[in-house]
Image: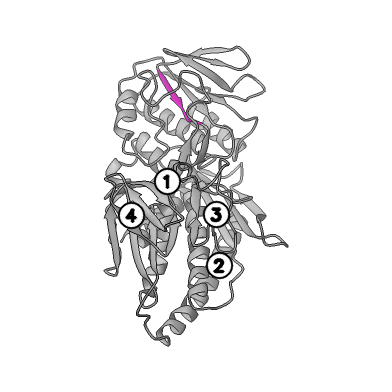
Amino acid sequence: MGKIKNSKRDFFKSLRNLFFTYFLSQLLLTKQTKAKKNKPRVVVIGAGFGGAGCISYLSKFSKILDLYVFDKHSSIQTGPFSNLVIGDIFTPQDITFKPKFSSNVEFYDKSVKFIQSEKKKIVFSDNQSFSYDILILSPGIGFKSKNIEGYSDGNIYLTPHCWDGEKNLADFKKRLNDLENNSKVLISAPDYPYRCPPAPYERASMIAYYLKKKKLNFTITILDSKDSFTKKENFFSEWKKNYNNSITWISRKEGGKVLSIKNKEVLTEKGLKFSGDIINIIPDQKASNIIHQSELINDDWCTVNPINFELRGHKDIYVLGDSIDAGDMPKSGFSANSQAQALSMNLINMLLQKKYTDPVFLNTCYSFSTNDRAFSITAWYRLNGSKDRIVSLGSKESQLLASDLERIDESKEAFGWYKNITKMMYG
């Protein structure tokens, strides 16, 4: 465990030093540059981990750009750590932030309806419009709601998926709190790619933690659209240690892929039927709806230039985070923030007429099994030889036989990371 933590810490320190070296050199060059009379109007849509990461960097360069931010919410509820609200470890208020951006950043809570890329305008739900010179999109994730027959957001037999930062955790918590002894919980995990690969299994852990604390007997069945998942052995070990045989995982080849839902029963592609007092279907995913509605892409995901994250076929539009095909990088808050640093750095390079910097990336994903036990996987990334794809340099996962103290230490590390990154982004 010590080697894993040291490797992660050393790489993160090197990456941070590299980032700040470039940041300081760009800032110094900017101070030596005359302020532009006609500064480019940079518009950021989405103030999650990707968008807010861009804002925290770009706001230091107001001498050469004007920065505007639009999000449909005035307060941001984070996807990371939302499972801990389900486990009653955090409150909704603990993961909700009212951004305190720099005074040179103009922030508006407005919902975007459409992007007119040919006119460089965004159109809001009230039909007002706003022009841009450079557009940065970090709008989160979209969902394939038609892949499972009978699935819809309005289905009264389904708990909300709570996968999009919307404020429906209260409904989920109410249904969970209403469960009685010997209740059955079903979770349908999506196929790759999707936001936060280990999150469905962390959710099972948090539901189990909550119900165990209430001294209820229960079963949780995870019906999976895949035959494996990240950190699987660590999850299995933690489930056995903390919840005995209460959590069962059924892979796709064993009949886990859900085809349809009717009332309180689901049917899988192998003809298996399961009933549940709570049915939590996490749908398959795609790029955010605003990207599809604006006809910016024809496929599920945005293809970007991984050097600067410019959207293929659309000059001056940049996309990062969950909506892009990021090669080997998973979709996570940590990944989006790492991409934000690279995008922002090379956007400033472009405005200063400097060469692009080949980016390097880091992702760490923490998962909780109880209130004070966590484990992680960390991976490092760079561009491939042709500089058109992000590829992995390797990864490190928490040891399967980690001690109780090591699990507790990782939970403290996870809490510290969340506190620091949200403070950096939202003030």
Give left or right: position of 240 versus 75.
right
Seen at 51% across and 36% down, the residue is 285
The label on residue 70 is: 4
What's the distance in space between the residues labelled 3 and 4, CA to CA?
26 Å
Sequence order check, earlier mark of 2 and 4: 2
Q: What residue is shown with label 3?
A: 363
Sequence order check, earlier mark of 1 and 4: 4
Asked which secondary structure carries label 4, the reply is: strand
Q: Give, as a single range, the part of the protein colored magenta.
A: 278-283
Q: Are marks 1 and 4 in contact (CB under 8 Å)?
A: no
Q: What residue is shown with label 1?
A: 80
The three-letter amino acid code for the residue at tag 3 is: Asn
Q: Nearer the viewer, residue 71 or 299?
A: 299
Q: Nearer the viewer, mark 1 or mark 4?
A: 4
The label on residue 15 is: 2
Q: In the figure, residue 56 lies in which quadrant? A: bottom left
Can residue 417 be seen in this snapshot?
no
Asked which secondary structure carries label 3, the reply is: strand
Percent coordinates x, y for residue 199 in the rendering: 49, 38
Give left or right: position of 269 versus 370.
right
Asked which secondary structure carries label 2, the reply is: helix
What's the distance in space between the residues labelled 1 and 3, CA to CA?
13 Å
